[in-house]
């Protein structure tokens, strides 16, 4: 449970976790199966409660939900000793507890809003960086309006994917270590960066000394502690993304707008020149890009996609275009392997009408493969696409690029046979090996209405474009394969052909 | 890096576990707490924590913001050194087997407005309150006689004048 709580804490997911505790009279005795749950989770929760009397529980649950969902959302733990679980309430009352220390600031300070508006109106090369906060506060339409008004291209963080439709001309896709070239380079060039609901993680910014050095930075976030934490900003605004954007828009709309059309077109032309290549129609083993292209052809804007962690996740983040908020679900801050499959189950249970597809690595899927029993027993018809490269691919990539190709403990071996594994649980399964087959198999899987696993055999040597840790965002290494060129053979710096354990 | 001493005053809910939450924020960021005092306030349900810590301004700003985020923390202020009164209480047990030493210790305590609060054939215990520097000075003086034990509370502090937190 702790890993899940930490994951939610990093990605501002509202969850209320109820933990069982030993009976009150045994607490502190190292009783059988006693764990100091509150102590362990203090650094990774927004708040926690331990009930000492059953009559406290309703208030804790009410307040727990309130705290988890408002302001910057996050996990709340309620620890319930066994005797309290069994105690009968005298009387049910669900008053919220008095929380004098909890008052999230939602409205931006008018003075700061004015300053931000000035910066924005003076900018010649504005860029918007949209984070998960935009999705949480349902601020996508305001964000889009701002982008339209001032002709600002939009890039997102990983958690911000879907906050701005990625098929829009203004969209530059994701920023960061595995970001799109157009995004990384344009952020470096912009003169005004409007960052909304993001926390400037090192995976997003690269080397901070080199981050957006030509820009006035406006940072809007509901969490005051995020402002100025990693990046020094010129205009900090504490508040809810939607409220603040509305405040900003109401000022900007009254002013004469700058003509940034030239900037916008420049970026758009540049973007077209470096659309990452996804067509690899003839390659066997399959290129992950091709697989993602085929997935994109099958799903629609309302399909919920979850990813695991590793190359599979970054490939999805880089190549897959998300069109709507809350349709791209990934573990960002903690990078929790094993996230994709259970997250898909959760999404499907919450929204049974939606198609849900999990894109997982073979390593990450193996961490949670027992949930094949869950999807079967509870009939949760999600599709799991296992990108089967037989490697802990992301770690292997680092070993190849930065650790002298010393491939250590990243080869997963010949086993298991994922199709047989799924079938052992009574789950529909199919192996995919050729271009074109992902599309068909996925279509059939969704149509079947049954939980299905697709074992998609991909090229273990494919390397993601990346900015090495500690480098500035423009220092992308490896060839950035561009769609229109269709090169046959691509060699990356420092890569080996077939990595072998112990080589 | 801009390292200096900070006095942080925090108004918190008087509940179990609050101290742990607060202290954890410092340790997690590699910040050493020099002293911490906790006690009741004018309002029954609230306690005041006074924390003295040395470190980088920027890190401390982050810690202050994180403290503010704790649900049990009502208010936090990084007090300005110059505009703050701070007082500490200290008990010093001095080895005083000889009459001559005894009277000297009593004299010194008097000069520092300390009081003798316990006497035994072998020892005198001095109570002193004041600025931490004043306490340091008395301890240094008494060291020559042989200090057996020192217990300090760590300073508690308040802004001068009408300002409150
Ligand atoms: C629980 C957990 N353990 C370890 C890691 C470190 N890690 C990050 S990516 C990765 C490899 C993932 O391999 P796989 O699931 O096969 O995905 P691929 O990168 O091959 O797509 C590892 C081990 C992690 N993020 N989470
Ligand atoms: Mg793998």
Image (tube, coloured by chain):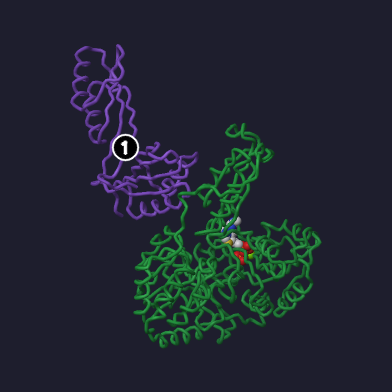
Check the picture and name the quadrant holding the N terminus of chain B: bottom left
Left or right: residue A6 compared with residue A248? right
Colour chosen for chain B: purple
In terms of secondary structure, where does tag 1 sit?
loop
Nearest the viewer among A215 and B13 is: B13
Image location (x, y in percent) of residue A101: 45, 50
Q: Which chain is green?
A: A
> Up-down: is A352 above or below A261?
above
Query: Label 1 neighbourhood size at 10 Å, few (<14), some (14-19), many (20+)?
Result: many
* Relative side of A470 to A384, left or right: left
Relative to A364, residue A89 above or below: above
**Front residue of this view, candidates A239 and A311:** A239
Of all chains, the one bearing label 1 is B
Horizontal and vertical percent for residue A479?
51, 77
Q: Is mark 1 within 8 Å of ligand 1?
A: no
Side of A340 where A126 appears, left or right: left
Residue B65 is at least partly visible in this image: yes
In which quarter of the view is residue A91 placed? top right
Task: Give the camera-side residue of A13 and A99.
Answer: A99
Residue located beneath label 1 in the image: B155
């Amino acid at each position: 449970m702790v890993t899940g709580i930490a994951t939610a804490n990093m990605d501002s997911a509202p969850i209320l976790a109820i933990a069982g505790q030993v009976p009150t009279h045994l607490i502190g005795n190292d009783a059988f199966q006693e764990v100091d749950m509150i102590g362990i989770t203090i650094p990774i929760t927004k708040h926690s409660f331990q009930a000492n009397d059953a009559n406290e529980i309703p208030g804790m649950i009410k307040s727990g939900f309130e705290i988890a969902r408002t302001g910057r959302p996050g996990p709340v733990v309620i620890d319930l000793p066994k005797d309290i679980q069994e105690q009968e309430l005298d009387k049910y009352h669900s008053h919220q507890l008095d929380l004098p220390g909890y008052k999230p600031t939602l409205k931006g300070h008018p003075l700061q809003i004015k300053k931000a508006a000035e910066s924005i109106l003076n900018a010649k090369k504005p860029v918007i960086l949209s984070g998960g906060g935009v999705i949480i506060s349902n601020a996508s339409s305001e964000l889009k309006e701002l982008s339209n008004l001032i002709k600002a291209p939009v890039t997102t963080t990983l958690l911000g994917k879907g906050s701005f439709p990625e098929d829009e001309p203004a969209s530059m896709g994701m920023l960061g270590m595995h970001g799109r070239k157009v995004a990384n380079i344009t952020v470096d060039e912009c003169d005004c960066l409007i960052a909304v609901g993001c926390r400037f993680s090192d995976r997003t910014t690269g080397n901070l000394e080199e981050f957006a050095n030509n820009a006035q930075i406006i940072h809007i976030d509901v969490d005051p502690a995020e402002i100025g934490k990693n990046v020094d900003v010129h205009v900090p605004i504490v508040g809810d993304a939607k409220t603040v954007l509305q405040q900003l828009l109401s000022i900007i709309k009254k002013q004469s707008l700058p003509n940034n059309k030239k900037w916008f077109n420049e970026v758009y032309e540049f973007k077209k020149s470096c659309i990452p290549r996804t067509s690899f129609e003839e390659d066997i083993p399959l290129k992950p890009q091709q697989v993602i292209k085929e997935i994109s052809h099958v799903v629609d804007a309302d399909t919920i996609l979850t990813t695991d962690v590793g190359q599979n996740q970054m490939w999805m983040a880089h190549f897959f275009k998300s069109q709507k908020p809350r349709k791209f679900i990934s573990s960002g801050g903690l990078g929790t392997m094993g996230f994709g499959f259970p997250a898909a189950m959760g999404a499907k249970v919450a929204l049974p009408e939606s198609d849900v597809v999990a894109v997982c690595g073979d390593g990450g899927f193996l961490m949670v493969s027992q949930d094949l029993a869950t999807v079967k027993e509870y009939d949760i018809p999600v599709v799991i696409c296992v990108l089967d490269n037989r490697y802990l691919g992301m770690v292997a990539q680092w070993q190849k690029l930065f650790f002298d190709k010393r491939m250590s403990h990243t080869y997963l071996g010949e086993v298991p046979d994922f199709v047989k594994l799924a079938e052992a649980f009574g789950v529909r399964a199919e192996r995919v090996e050729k271009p074109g087959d992902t599309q068909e198999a996925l279509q059939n899987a969704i149509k079947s209405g049954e939980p299905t696993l697709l074992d998609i055999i991909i090229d273990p040597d494919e390397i993601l474009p990346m900015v090495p840790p500690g480098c500035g965002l423009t220092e992308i290494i490896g060839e950035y394969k561009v769609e229109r060129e269709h090169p046959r053979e691509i060699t990356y710096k420092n890569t080996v052909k077939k990595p072998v354990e112990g080589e | 890096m801009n390292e200096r001493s900070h006095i942080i005053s925090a108004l918190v809910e008087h509940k179990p576990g609050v101290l742990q939450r607060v202290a954890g924020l410092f340790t997690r960021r590699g910040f050493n707490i020099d002293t911490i005092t906790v006690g009741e306030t004018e309002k029954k349900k609230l306690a005041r924590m006074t924390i003295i810590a040395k470190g980088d301004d920027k890190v401390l700003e982050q810690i202050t913001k994180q403290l503010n985020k704790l649900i049990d923390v009502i208010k936090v202020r990084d007090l300005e050194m110059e505009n703050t009164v701070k007082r500490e209480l200290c008990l010093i047990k001095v080895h005083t087997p000889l009459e001559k030493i005894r009277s000297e210790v009593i004299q010194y305590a008097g000069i520092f407005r300390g009081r003798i609060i316990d006497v035994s054939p072998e020892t005198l215990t001095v109570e002193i309150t004041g600025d931490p520097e004043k306490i340091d000075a008395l301890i240094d003086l008494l060291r020559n006689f042989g200090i057996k034990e020192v217990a300090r509370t760590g300073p508690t502090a308040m802004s001068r004048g009408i300002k409150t937190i």
